[in-house]
Amino acid sequence: MELTETYATIPGASVSGLYFHHPESRYFAVGRIARDQVDDYAARKGIPLAEAERWLRPNLAYEPEQVAPLRS
């Protein structure tokens, strides 16, 4: 991995970071996405609910009624 003169990484898919530890730190998990959150997301993005559910399916806290077909 290299850095350019403007500090971009080469190759572009490279990942780096600073990790800090503190003995009193606490970690948390992000929960699954509820139906009301998906409704709001679909409305803000201007996409059908079924499409939002298809893209978010691995993270849903519920089973969608139907799976939207892939667009070509």
Image (tube, grey):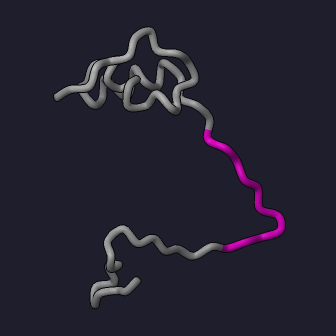
- What is the magenta range? 20-30
Would you say 3 lies left or right of 56 here? left
Q: Quadrant of residue 51?
A: top left
Q: Nearer the viewer, residue 24 or 67?
A: 67
Residue 43: where, in percent of width, then height?
Answer: 30, 23
- Residue reaching furthest to the top: 65
Residue 62: where, in percent of width, then height?
Answer: 55, 18
Figure disc tally: 0
Would you say 47 lies left or right of 56 here? left
| Residue drawn at 43 percent across, 24 percent down | 38
Residue 46: where, in percent of width, then height?
Answer: 24, 26
- Residue reaching furthest to the bottom: 5
Q: Nearer the viewer, residue 21 or 14?
A: 14
Q: Is residue 56 magenta?
A: no
| Residue drawn at 49 percent across, 74 percent down | 16
Q: Compared with residue 51, is residue 28 higher up or lower down, i.e. above or below?
A: below
Quadrant including the C terminus: top left
| Residue drawn at 43 percent across, 31 percent down | 56
- Residue reaching furthest to the left: 72
| Residue drawn at 40 percent across, 20 percent down | 39
Q: Quadrant of residue 54?
A: top left
Task: Name the main secondary structure of what is drawn in magenta.
Answer: loop
Q: Is residue 26 magenta?
A: yes
